[in-house]
Amino acid sequence: MLALLAAGEIDGAVVKRGIDFLVRTQEADGHWDEPWFTGTGFPRDFMLNYHLYRDIWPLWALGRYRRMRRGEEIHLPGTDPWR
């Protein structure tokens, strides 16, 4: 979704389905369930789970979508993201 939003696809059907999915699957405590491992360590030995990835990426996408729908800048006013 972040890539589609960066490409300006804010009104596309795929973005709308993605937003709907994120809103629909968010749990009451504000998190998203992700029972699978999110990274590999040594396959068949140990696996990694980046615990906050399941929250950071959906929140980033939802926040970016909301700001773009409102016509707001996607970066904080007065900041240069390339510094």
Image (tube, rainbow, N blue to C red):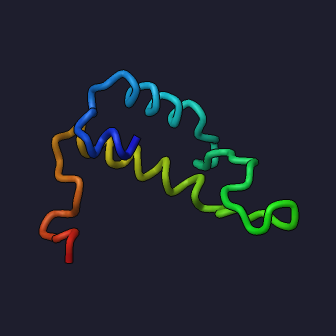
The one of 36 and 58 positioned closer to us in this rendering: 36
**Which corner quadrant holds the N terminus?**
top left
Quarter where residue 15 is shown: top left
Residue shown at 74% from the left, 49% from the top = 36
Above or below — where is 9 with respect to 67? above
Q: Where does residue 62 sit, x and y in percent of width and height?
A: 40, 44
Left or right of 35? Residue 2 is left
Q: Residue furthest top?
A: 13
Q: Residue furthest left?
A: 78
Above or below — where is 67 with respect to 23? below
Q: Residue furthest bottom?
A: 83
**Which corner quadrant holds the C terminus?**
bottom left
Left or right of 74? Residue 59 is right
Residue shown at 87% from the left, 66% from the top = 45
Q: Residue furthest front?
A: 43
Left or right of 43? Residue 21 is left
Q: Where does residue 26 sit, x and y in percent of width and height?
A: 58, 40
Quarter where residue 39 is shown: bottom right
The one of 3 and 78 positioned closer to us in this rendering: 3
Residue shown at 35% from the left, 45% from the top = 3
Q: Where does residue 78 sit, x and y in percent of width and height?
A: 12, 69
The one of 53 and 38 positioned closer to us in this rendering: 38
Above or below — where is 64 with respect to 10? below
The one of 2 and 77 positioned closer to us in this rendering: 2
